[in-house]
Amino acid sequence: MSKKLVAYFSASGVTAALAKTLAEAAGADLYEIKPEVSYTKADLNWNDKQSRSSIEMNGQSFRPAIADTDANIAAYDVVFVGFPIWWYVAPTIFNTFLESYDFSGKTIVTFATSGGSGLGKTIEKLQPSVSGTAVWKEGKLLNGRPSKDALAAWVESLNLH
């Protein structure tokens, strides 16, 4: 049986709630990716071209600092990585997280929440941030409030054993 981790970033709490349910459904540990400087409501105003999130997402090479790098990635076989979709991709803070660890030999499964867009080219954009030879499993957009049973069925369908 593989040891699993659900690592997530959530700016508004939506992805956090989903990550907690997924961790329960998958029998996984939970790790929150926290920015060094928390996002305010004004920072997340995508209608404001000068908001922090708009500036970060306009420069895909931007890497917001994370509060810590103490996730023990080496201890896990499977890492579920979750985030909200911003501008059709993962927030650049997620690249910061992925670039902070060695994912050699790990299986990475993405999941995301979104107010209206799909996953788009999210995985394609994240893969260059991962060092080592990781195996990527098809990600899933998990909007609404999927039940623990529904999430457990999805995890089972991934055949991660």
Image (cartoon, helix red, strand yellow):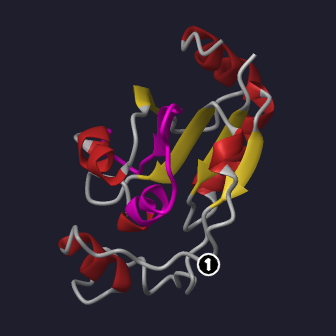
Q: At which x and y percent is residue 139?
A: 42, 30
Image point (47%, 37%), residue name: 110
Left or right for 92, reference 100: left
**Which residue is rendered at x = 57% and y = 9% of the image?**
157
Residue 64, how many percent across, how many down? 41, 78
Disc 1: CA contacts within 10 A as few (<14), some (14-19) or many (>=20) = few
Foreground of the two, 146 or 35: 35
Quadrant of res 57: bottom left
In the figure, residue 135 lies in which quadrant?
top left
Q: Is residue 27 visible?
A: yes
Location of the C terminus by quadrant is top right
Quick check: is 118 in the magenta stretch? yes
- In what element is the residue under mark 1? loop
**Would residue 116 be counted in the magenta stretch?**
yes
- State the extent of the magenta-drawn residues as a range: 94-119
Where does the image place residue 56, in percent across and percent down from the top left? Answer: 30, 77
**How many numbered circles does the render carry?**
1
Q: Which residue is mark 1?
A: 67
Question: Residue drawn at (52%, 56%), measured in percent from left and top?
Answer: 101
Picture quadrant where residue 23 is located: top right
> Would residue 47 be seen by someone viewing this image from the given angle?
no
In the rendered structure, the answer to whether residue 30 lies left or right of residue 41 reads right
Question: For the point 71% across and 22% down, which residue is it?
Answer: 2
Front-most of 103 and 114?
A: 103
Up-down relation of residue 20 to residue 4 (above or below): below
Horizontal and vertical percent position of residue 20: 74, 45
| Type of the residue with mark 1 | Ala
* On-image quarter of the N terminus: top right
